[in-house]
Image: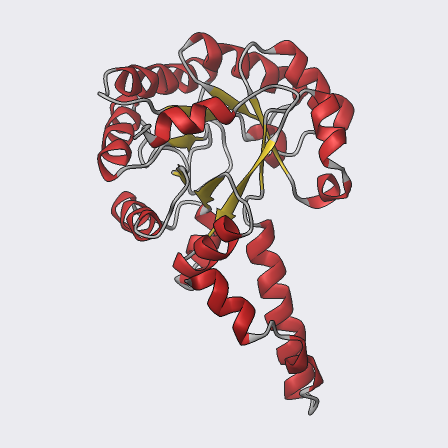
């Protein structure tokens, strides 16, 4: 049987993006893979929401690993872990997170360059050393493992597209397998990022980018599309809107639920 890491790596082809569906529990995992997801991923924000917490450094490594293990218990496709900043500031912390993630069966993880729980980015050189250590740990594993390096400052607003590209190029040279700068200014900036690096690029389908087509992402050179917490937020929007009407006296929105037969089919 082909290892999930090997299967996951083969999906990454520039200009032919696949959807890596971010999920938050066993039920959402079963639904998305039954509907055609070729890979799944946890979402730190969506996971935090299930625990009644906000996103951004509120999860521990043990919690993230346990959550990922729960997803893996029902997954039939490769699963990536959203492991925030690697759950530590040092390169050794990132390396240890890679080893622990591989041990539970994840096909890969992503590591961002933000000093959590704040918004400040790690110093450029330290950010690269963190990825170098993580990549070294990944290459020492007995099976394939896809390491995604994230330049999150472009989304947070702590650095611009040029700085993000410089970081991504450094991450690539340090051994990252996939590169990710979530929410660049526009599609032109995303295409520029894809052209400037020599590794597959992940794009986040959220905000204005949710208005783009799969073909549009392909033309930009993207290899992988992730949802982040966008699908979880759509679910929370449904809860919010329905409950708002309910507590104002109308239960009509409760008629919009999916039927039991469809759910049962996906769960089994």
Tally of numbered tags: 0
Q: Which residue is painted at 44% across and 53% down in the image?
A: 29
Picture coordinates of residue 110, whole percent (x, y): 43, 31
In the visual, does 149 lie left or right of 231? left
In the visual, does 218 lie left or right of 119? right
Q: Which quadrant, please, contains the N terminus?
A: top left
Does 73 appear above or below 129? below
Please tell me which residue lies in front, 107 or 117. Answer: 107
Q: Which residue is painted at 38% across and 45% down in the image?
A: 76
In the visual, does 201 lie left or right of 140? right
* Residue 195 picture quarter: top right
In the visual, does 265 lie left or right of 108? right
Picture coordinates of residue 209, whole percent (x, y): 72, 39
Can you see residue 48? Answer: yes
* Residue 83 picture quarter: top left
Picture coordinates of residue 88, whole percent (x, y): 31, 33
């Amino acid at each position: 049987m082909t290892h999930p890491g090997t299967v996951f790596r083969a999906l990454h082809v520039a200009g032919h993006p696949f959807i890596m569906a971010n999920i938050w529990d066993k039920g959402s995992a079963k639904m998305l893979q039954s509907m055609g997801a070729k890979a799944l991923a946890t979402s730190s924000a969506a996971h935090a929401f299930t625990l009644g917490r906000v996103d951004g450094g509120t999860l521990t490594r043990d919690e993230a690993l346990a959550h990922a293990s729960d997803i893996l218990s029902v997954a039939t496709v490769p699963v990536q872990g959203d492991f925030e900043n690697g759950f530590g500031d040092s390169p050794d912390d990132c390396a240890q997170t890679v080893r622990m993630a591989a041990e539970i069966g994840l096909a890969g993880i992503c590591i961002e360059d933000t000093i959590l729980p704040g918004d400040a980015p790690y110093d450029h050189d330290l950010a690269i050393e963190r990825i170098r250590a993580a990549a070294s740990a990944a290459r020492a594993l007995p099976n394939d493992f896809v390491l995604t390096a994230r330049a999150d400052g472009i989304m947070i607003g702590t650095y611009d597209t040029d700085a993000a590209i410089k970081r991504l190029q450094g991450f690539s040279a340090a051994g990252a397998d996939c590169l990710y700068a979530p929410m660049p200014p526009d599609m032109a900036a995303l295409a520029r990022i894809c052209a400037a690096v020599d590794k597959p690029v992940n794009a986040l389908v959220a905000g204005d980018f949710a208005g783009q087509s799969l073909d549009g992402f392909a033309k930009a050179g993207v290899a992988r599309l992730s949802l982040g917490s966008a699908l979880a937020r759509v679910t929370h929007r449904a809860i919010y809107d329905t409950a708002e009407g309910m507590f104002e006296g109308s239960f009509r929105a409760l008629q919009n639920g999916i039927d039991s037969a469809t759910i049962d089919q996906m769960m089994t």
